[in-house]
Image (spheres, coloured by chain):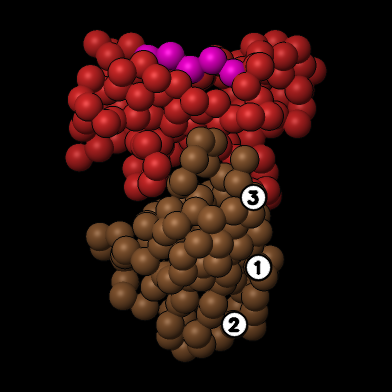
Chain colours: A brown, B red
Amino acid sequence: DVQMTQSPSSVSASVGDTVIITCRASQDISTWVAWYQQKPGKAPNLLIYSASSVQSGVPSRFSGSGSGTDFSLTISSLQPEDFATYYCQEANTFPPTFGQGTKVEVK
Amino acid sequence: QITLKESGPTLVKPTQTLTLTCTFSGFSLSSGGVAVAWIRQPPGKALEWLALIYWNDDKHYSSSLKSRLTITKDTSKNQVVLTLTNMDPVDTATYYCVRGPWYYADWGQGILVTVSS
């Protein structure tokens, strides 16, 4: 199975900040990566797929980049509704695997 | 509009078998390329992918849970069923069904299953 190592596990930030979350894959997965946002008590919401494609309806302050083994999710100009937990997911081989999550907290 | 909804018991005893049903609408599992998967999340922990079934009945399972999992579909009822045998307290989690196969834009609301005697 591909291992996805996500960092940091948590980050404290203020409204207006830029937050960068990274994921490292244990093997080359090209651009087969997705990013999700999850709020307490809710199902995850797909933000980014294929490493850099923004899902329909997702604000443009969310962007993704990377290929091979290193990937990142950038949240520009953090908004109050962005405080949540974020997960990466590899989609290269079965079974797909998720990172351990990054909680974006209020500073 | 695509919807998915999980149903099944919310409390099971250790060693019992869990059977969950995903009932969906807005798409058909008889259409090429379509798949439904199950993902779970223990309280306060990360997401864990469990199993997936394709329109052509091709199936894939979690490496660590493969021996305990079975996924099946009933295309006529728009349902996918997941069974997990020999339940243990560590299997306590919210179980989600999702439309696949690779990127999960459509999720059910989830069902919290607690394993306790």
Residue topped by disc 1: A7
Point out residue B70 in the picture as x, y percentages from the top left corner: 54, 15
Query: Residue under circle 2?
Result: A13
The amino acid type of the residue labelled 1 equals Ser
* Of the two numbered discs 2 and 1 in the rendering, the one whose residue sits closer to the viewer: 1
Q: Secondary structure at mark 2?
A: strand
Quadrant of residue B93 in the image? top right
**Residue A100 at x, y = what percent?**
65, 55
Question: What residue range appears in magenta?
Answer: B69-73
Q: In front: B37, or B56?
A: B56
Subunit under mark 2 = A
Q: Are marks 2 and 1 on the same chain?
A: yes
Discs 2 and 3 lie in a common subunit: yes
Q: Is residue A68 magenta?
A: no
Disc 3 marks which amino acid? Gln
Q: Which image quarter holds the C terminus of chain B?
A: top right
For mark 3, what is the residue? A3
Element assignment for label 3 = loop
Would you say the magenta stretch is mainly helix, strand or loop?
A: strand
Which image quadrant for residue A63? bottom left
